[in-house]
Each structure stands twice: as C-alpha cells, then as structure tokens.
Amino acid sequence: MVRPDAGTTAIDHEILAERASSLGAAEKRVGKAVAALAAATGDRDACLAEARKVVWEYFVQRELVGFRKHTDVIQDLSIPGEVLVGLGAISKAPR
C-alpha cells in the first residue's frame, strides 16, 4: 500500500528541528545583547540599537512559528522597557 504522506514525515521532523534550533539561537542572541546593554558604559546607544534589532528579529521569528504572545519571554530574558519602547511594543518604559 502506498502512503503519500509517509515520505514527508522525516522532512517535517527535520523542519521542526531546524525551527527549534533557529529560535534557540535567536534567544541566545537576545540574552547576549541584553547583557551587553546592561554592562554598557561607553557607547550605550549602539548597545541599545543592537538589543532592539535582535529582540525585534526574535519576536518576528517567534511569530512565524506561531508564538504570538511575548510576555513570558520578555520577563524570562529580562528585556528592558527601553528596548521594547524602541520596537513600538509599549508606549513608554516602565520605571
């Protein structure tokens, strides 16, 4: 008996694994950027711009795989309000 969907199972699994790996790598970049921003003493504006860039990329990637709410990862990764303000995610940074 021929099952047309049987041949795609391995590919589907591979795609899911790549998505998870890519999302994990993006999360690591966010962690590094947030840490660099927290430690910044000199060119803080460049660190802030980098943090906004990688957080935006991470959020887009999460949304592409179906995660629409970011509240938990914002808290888990300690993403500062000043980063989120630059993304348009909130209207002003919390104090």
Image (cartoon, rainbow, N blue to C red):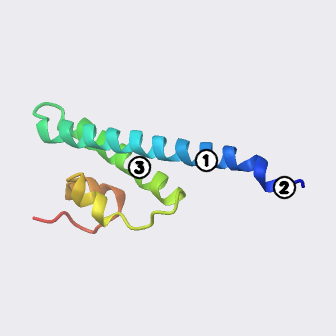
Q: Earlier in the sequence, mark 3 or mark 1?
A: 1
- Residue 85 visible: no
Q: Which mark is residue 32?
A: none
The vertical placement of 46 against 67, above or below, is above
User: Quick one: label 1, few (<14), some, or many (20+) residues within 10 Å?
Assistant: few
At label 1, the amino acid type is His
Q: Earlier in the sequence, mark 2 or mark 1?
A: 2
At label 3, the amino acid type is Tyr
View extreme (right): residue? 1
Which residue is nearer to you in this view: 86 or 14? Answer: 14
Q: Earlier in the sequence, mark 3 or mark 2?
A: 2
Which residue is nearer to you in this view: 40 or 61? Answer: 61
At label 2, the amino acid type is Arg
Question: Which residue: 22% across, 60% down?
Answer: 75
Do the residues bearing badges 3 and 1 touch, measured as CB atoms within 8 Å?
no
- Quarter occupied by the N terminus: bottom right
User: Quick one: label 2, few (<14), some, or many (20+) residues within 10 Å?
Assistant: few
Q: Position of residue 14 (x, y in %)?
A: 61, 42
Question: Which residue: 45% across, 63% down?
Answer: 67
7 left or right of 2? left
Give the distance between the C-alpha atoms of the residues marked 3 and 1, in whole angstroms: 22 Å
Q: Nearer the viewer, mark 2 or mark 1?
A: 2
Q: Which mark is residue 3?
A: 2
Please name the residue that numbered disc 1 is placed on: 13
Q: Which mark is residue 58?
A: 3
